[in-house]
Image: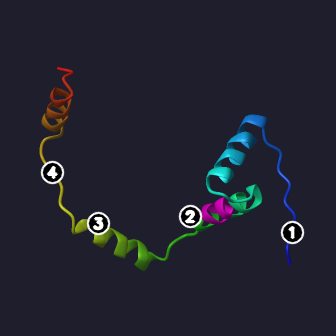
């Protein structure tokens, strides 16, 4: 079964949605449905084992480490701000 959903939005927001739909060569309704589905999927709570696996995958990567004040100073000097 399908239901109709009606929303009210300011003209500028609606125009932005129309532009986005045109860029993707999709009807506005399809773009809105896809966006709502993505939002609902993002809000879904992941099971604990999936969250742990994601953390473990990330932990395999190494990155720069060091004193935070020194790292920030190096960044700023590279930007020519000091």
Mark 4, other Cα within 10 Å: few <14 / some 14–19 / many ≥20: few
**Residue at (68, 61) in percent of width and height:** 36
Q: Quadrant of residue 38?
A: bottom right
Q: Mark 1 to mark 3: distance in Å?
A: 41 Å
**Residue at (41, 79) in percent of width and height:** 49
Q: Mark 2 to mark 1: distance in Å?
A: 22 Å
Where does label 3 land, which residue?
Answer: 58
Secondary structure type for disc 4: loop
Which region of the structure is painted magenta? 34-39
N-terminal label among 1 and 3: 1
- What percent of the width, then of the height, locates residue 16? 68, 42
N-terminal label among 2 and 3: 2
- What percent of the width, then of the height, locates residue 3? 87, 69
Q: Quadrant of residue 5?
A: bottom right
**Residue at (29, 66) in percent of width and height:** 58
Q: Mark 4 to mark 3: distance in Å?
A: 14 Å
């Amino acid at each position: 079964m399908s239901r109709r959903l009606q929303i009210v939005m300011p003209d500028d927001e609606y125009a932005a949605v129309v532009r986005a739909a045109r860029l993707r060569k999709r009807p506005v309704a399809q773009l809105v449905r896809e966006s709502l589905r993505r939002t609902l999927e993002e809000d879904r709570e992941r099971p604990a084992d999936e969250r742990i696996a994601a953390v473990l995958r990330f932990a395999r990567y190494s990155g720069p480490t060091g004193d935070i004040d020194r790292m920030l100073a190096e960044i700023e000097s590279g930007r020519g701000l000091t």
